[in-house]
Image: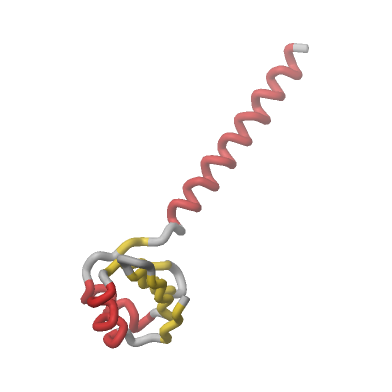
Amino acid sequence: MTGSSVAFSTKRDKNVDINQESVQCRDESMPSEIVDVEKFVGMSVRAEYCSVKRLKDVVKLKLRTPRTLYTMKVEPGKAEEIIKKLQCEIREI
């Protein structure tokens, strides 16, 4: 009976390790928020597209690069100026 208890705890420890690894992987793939407009426009050169989501008081711009999703929140008046500067496909959501 003691042997099965040890096997169970070993199995449980393996599950904990697997879960911790998957959490680390998810953290690395989370979107990054950019606050500098010039940096965001510069990243648009290597982006596949930019999604534009218009809400009541803010516009969300989302740049999809091959590896990462970058986001930026701006006020509606500034958004049009930034969108004109972007060097990738624009998709309205």
Depth order, front residue of 59/2: 59
Residue 64 picture quarter: bottom left
Q: Residue at x 34, y 87 (%)?
A: 87
Q: Residue at x 24, y 73 (%)?
A: 39
Q: Is residue 48 visible?
A: no
Q: Is residue 33 left or right of residue 4?
A: left
Q: Residue furthest right?
A: 1
Q: Is residue 81 left or right of residue 63?
A: left
Q: Residue at x 59, y 41 (%)?
A: 18
Q: Is residue 90 left or right of residue 85?
A: right
Q: Residue at x 40, y 79 (%)?
A: 47
Instruction: Check the image and tell me how it is coloured.
Output: secondary structure
Depth order, front residue of 75/66: 75
Could you tell me which quadrant the N terminus lies in? top right
Depth order, front residue of 69/73: 73
In the image, is residue 42 above or below residue 4? below
Residue 4 picture quarter: top right
- Total label count? 0
Residue 60 picture quarter: bottom left
Where is residue 27 shown, x and y percent of the image?
Answer: 44, 51
Q: Is residue 16 visible?
A: yes
Depth order, front residue of 46/89: 89
Where is residue 8 shown, x and y percent of the image?
Answer: 70, 24
Where is residue 42 shown, x and y percent of the image?
Answer: 27, 79
Q: Residue furthest top?
A: 1
